[in-house]
Image: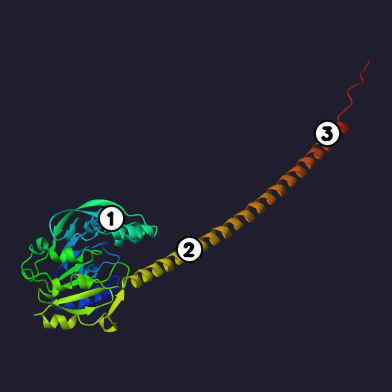
Amino acid sequence: MTPPPFVSYAQNLEDVVLSRLLTAAPHGRFIDVGAGHPVHGNVMHGLYLHGWRGINVEPMPVEAELLRAMRPHDETIQAAVGAATGSITLFEAPPENRGATTSSAELADRYHAQGQQFVAFESPLITLSSLLARFQPGSVHVVKIDVEGMEHDVLAGADLHKHRPWVLVIEATEPNSTTTSAHRWEHLVLEAGYQCTLFDGLNRFYVRADLIDVASLLSVPANVFDNWVPALALDLAEAQRAFGDLQQYVAALLREMATLQTSHRDAEEYARSLLASNELLQASAAESATYASSLEQELAKQRAAHSPDTSGSCR
């Protein structure tokens, strides 16, 4: 039997590529740096639904709260990740461009020039090494990094020689651009014994050099042989089913309305017939009353005609 298709929630099908690890790691572990929304556009949600568990790191309060609510089997930390612990000023993007939240004042100013209002706020700052240290070395299967220009700082705070996650998925272009940014930080990954197996146009996938089979699995983009469907297609199918149900409900209401209208017309016709019958009865009663009155008058006349004359007297 063909297994059900993998449902992809990620913006660029990163989760479809990673789903090839499900056989080797059915209960995988992950660290999602810059997790964003728990479902929409989320790289790890599809794997979460297949039993993977991990740590979501997200500095935005609203998104962090959603992650806690919608991913209860994960741990969510509201913080940014950098080269050292402390705090950092971030620039919160407007709702229509939420994923563009950044630590770069220059980038925030650039967006501001385009008419987008960014709001500065302070966030706790932790390191990737502190997160990896919570697991046994080599037991984390995927680290995903999407931090809008902070990739170098995140990797500088990660001892990848000591903590050996299987796979790193790192956004490797400038925000909202096809211009690569990997030259700024890739040496930190390669020097730690990782090889780049795939660039999907947005992210670079790195696999530990000793994991040859895993590198082979993650060497081609998502394709038809991965047996996947976009979550949007399921949402559309559900919306179509709901619309069909609504149409049936409306049709049933219209049938009931037609029945009520027919019953109302029948009731009106019956009421009119009763009214007509009542008018006939009233007319008949009036005729009967007139006839009875005439009979009474005739009877009175007859009685008067046959009454004896008592006006005379005997003298």
Residue pictured at 35% horizontal, 68% vertical: 235
Q: Secondary structure at mark 2?
A: helix
Residue 43 lies in quadrant = bottom left
Tell me which amino acid carries mark 1: Phe
Q: Which quadrant of the rendered structure holds the N terminus?
A: bottom left
* Residue 287 relative to residue 212: left or right: right
Residue 289: x %, y % from top left? 76, 40
Callout 3: few (<14), some (14-19), or many (20+) C-alpha neighbours within 10 Å?
few
Q: Which residue is mark 3?
A: 300
Question: Disc 2 and disc 3: Cα gap in Å?
Answer: 73 Å
- 248 displayed left or right of 189: right
Residue 88 x %, y %:
20, 54
Looking at the rendered structure, the kind of residue marked 3 is Ala
Instruction: Give coordinates of residue 281: x percent, y percent.
Output: 70, 47
Q: Earlier in the sequence, mark 2 or mark 3?
A: 2
Circle 3 — which element? Answer: helix
Please state which of residues 298 and 110 is positioned toward the viewer in this rendering.
Answer: 110
Total labels: the figure holds 3
Task: Estimate how packed mark 1 is, as few (under 14), some (14 to 19) or many (20 or more) residues with alpha carbons within 10 Å.
Answer: many
Eye-nearest disc, 2 or 3? 2
Q: Residue at x 25, y 62 (%)?
A: 38
Q: Which residue is mark 2?
A: 250
Question: Real-space Cα distance between discs 1 and 2?
Answer: 48 Å
Q: Is residue 25 visible?
A: no
What numbered label is drawn on residue 91? Answer: 1
Query: For the residue labelled by badge 1, is the local secondary structure a helix, a strand or a loop?
Result: strand
Q: Where, by quadrant of the figure, is residue 184 drawn?
A: bottom left
